[in-house]
Image (cartoon, rainbow, N blue to C red):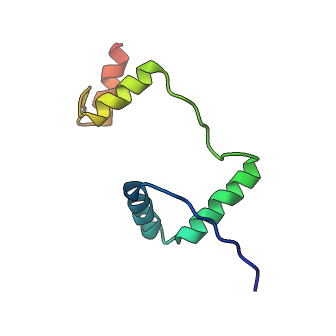
């Protein structure tokens, strides 16, 4: 049997619970998810997704969304129609 190593991570309980729920629905164990993430780090030679600091406009929009503010649409089509007006 192959040798294994242990990795420990500190997460907020909410993030841990939500991520574990998604992984369970996908049929993926926490250990498998960690291994996949580490393999992608190796394959990409770094973090396997783009990491950027959002600009002020994006941060403001994100905060408005968290507060339940901002534009709301019933359909994607309605949203795109509104965007075409801009």
Instruction: Please give the name of the residue rendered at 44% of the width and 70% of the height, measured from the top-left corner.
Output: 24
Is residue 85 shown left or right of residue 59?
left
Is residue 36 shown left or right of residue 82?
right
Q: Is residue 49 above or below residue 11?
A: above
Extreme top residue here?
A: 86
**Residue 51: image x %, image y %?**
59, 36
User: Which image quarter is the N terminus in?
Assistant: bottom right
Q: Is residue 29 above or below residue 74?
A: below
Is residue 76 shown left or right of residue 11?
left
**Residue 18: image x %, image y %?**
39, 59
Instruction: Please give the name of the residue rendered at 36% of the width and 26% of the height, measured from the top-left corner.
Output: 61
Depth check: 8 or 33 in front?
A: 8
Quadrant of the rendered image containing residue 16: bottom left
Is residue 80 shown left or right of residue 34?
left
Q: Is residue 30 above or below residue 69?
A: below
In this figure, what is the number of numbered marks? 0
Depth check: 82 or 50 in front?
A: 50
Depth check: 44 or 7 in front?
A: 7
User: Which image quarter is the C terminus in?
Assistant: top left
Instruction: Please give the name of the residue rendered at 68% of the width and 58% of the height, measured from the top-left corner.
Output: 38
**Residue 57: image x %, image y %?**
42, 19
Instruction: Please give the name of the residue rendered at 42% of the width and 54% of the height, measured from the top-left corner.
Output: 12
**Residue 46: image x %, image y %?**
72, 45
Extreme bottom residue here?
A: 1
């Amino acid at each position: 049997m192959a040798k294994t190593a242990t990795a420990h991570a500190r997460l907020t309980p909410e993030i841990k619970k939500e991520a574990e729920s998604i992984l369970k629905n996908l049929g993926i164990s926490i250990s498998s998810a960690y291994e996949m993430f580490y393999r992608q780090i190796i394959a990409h030679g770094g973090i396997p997704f783009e990491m950027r600091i959002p600009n002020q406009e994006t941060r403001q929009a994100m905060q408005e969304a968290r507060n339940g503010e901002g534009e709301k649409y019933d359909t994607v089509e309605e949203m795109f129609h509104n965007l075409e007006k801009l």
